């Protein structure tokens, strides 16, 4: 009688644990199969090749998350805190974040849509709301990837610690600049419901 296949969820759970503990180098078919006590053939049959496994891990990670989504006094504040929460979530699994690609942005589409809805309710024109939320998402992902890669730099490198701290500090400032630009564009378009600027604060 044929041995039953190992559940896919077991493979994904172990793969993420390996990734978190040892980095991308540990995520090889041979290492993962050995840890799970299965053949590489069975592994490929269950989850495909390494690239397919990584894409599935990213999608699975975000599908299981429940990012805190809270509305604040205005869209600026809501968007700012959304970006900070998203950033912290990405930092929680730095090796996985570092492996993200453009295609993986679809995994957070539901969270982006929630932010768009808040902007629309406050009177932000749909085109600006969609583009602004996409920009905030891309900047948050890209900036976090830069942060986690900076952490890989050799500890003895001159200025590494200072530069890493500087990158982290620049993130909230960058988000505020984007929000200020969105506010200015909407105000220039004479949308009175959100014409009075209020800067989001942590």
Image: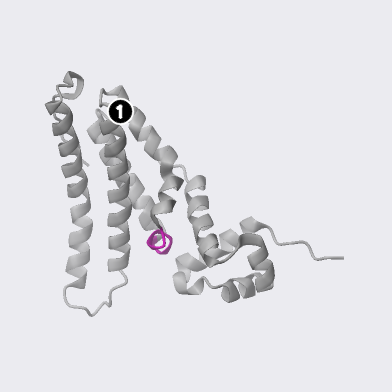
> Of helix, strand and loop, which mostly describes the magenta segment?
helix
Q: Looking at the picture, how far across and down is residue 12, in whole percent?
A: 58, 59
Give the vertical position of 33 relative to 79 (above or below): below
Q: Residue at x 36, y 28 (%)?
A: 117
Image quadrant where one finds the N terminus: bottom right
What residue is rendered at 42% in x and 59% in y? Answer: 93
Would you name the residue on which mark 1 appears?
Answer: 126
Residue 94 visible in the picture: yes
Residue 32 left/right relative to 183: right
Magenta span contains residue 97: yes
From the top left corner, tell me how far across and down residue 4 is, in percent.
78, 62
Residue at 19 percent of width and 42 percent of height = 178
Instruction: Give left or right: position of 12 versus 98.
Output: right
x and y, in percent, of residue 96 in the image? 43, 61
Mark 1 element type: helix
Q: Residue furthest front?
A: 127
As drawn, is 82 to the left or to the right of 27? left
Q: Residues within 10 Å of mark 1 (few under 14, many from 20)?
A: few
Residue shown at the point (28%, 44%) measured from the top left? 136
With respect to residue 143, does 117 lie above or below? above
Q: Is residue 191 magenta?
A: no
Which residues are drawn in magenta?
94-100
């Amino acid at each position: 009688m044929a041995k039953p296949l190992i559940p896919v969820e077991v493979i994904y759970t172990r793969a993420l644990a390996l990734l978190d503990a040892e980095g991308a180098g540990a995520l090889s078919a041979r290492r993962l199969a050995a840890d799970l006590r299965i053949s590489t053939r069975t592994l490929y049959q269950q989850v495909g090749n390494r690239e397919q496994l990584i894409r599935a891990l990213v999608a699975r990670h975000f599908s299981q998350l429940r990012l805190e989504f809270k509305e604040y006094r205005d869209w600026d504040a809501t968007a700012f805190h959304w970006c900070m929460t998203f950033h912290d979530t990405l930092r929680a699994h730095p090796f996985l974040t570092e492996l993200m690609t453009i295609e993986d942005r679809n995994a957070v589409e539901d969270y982006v849509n929630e932010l768009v809805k808040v902007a629309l309710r406050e009177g932000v024109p749909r085109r600006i709301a969609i583009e602004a939320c996409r920009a905030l998402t891309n900047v948050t992902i890209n900036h976090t990837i830069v942060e986690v890669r900076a952490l890989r730099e050799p500890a003895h490198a001159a200025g590494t610690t200072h530069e890493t701290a500087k990158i982290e500090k620049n993130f909230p400032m960058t988000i505020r600049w984007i929000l200020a630009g969105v506010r200015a564009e909407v105000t220039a378009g004479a949308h009175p419901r959100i014409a009075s600027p209020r800067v989001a604060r942590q």
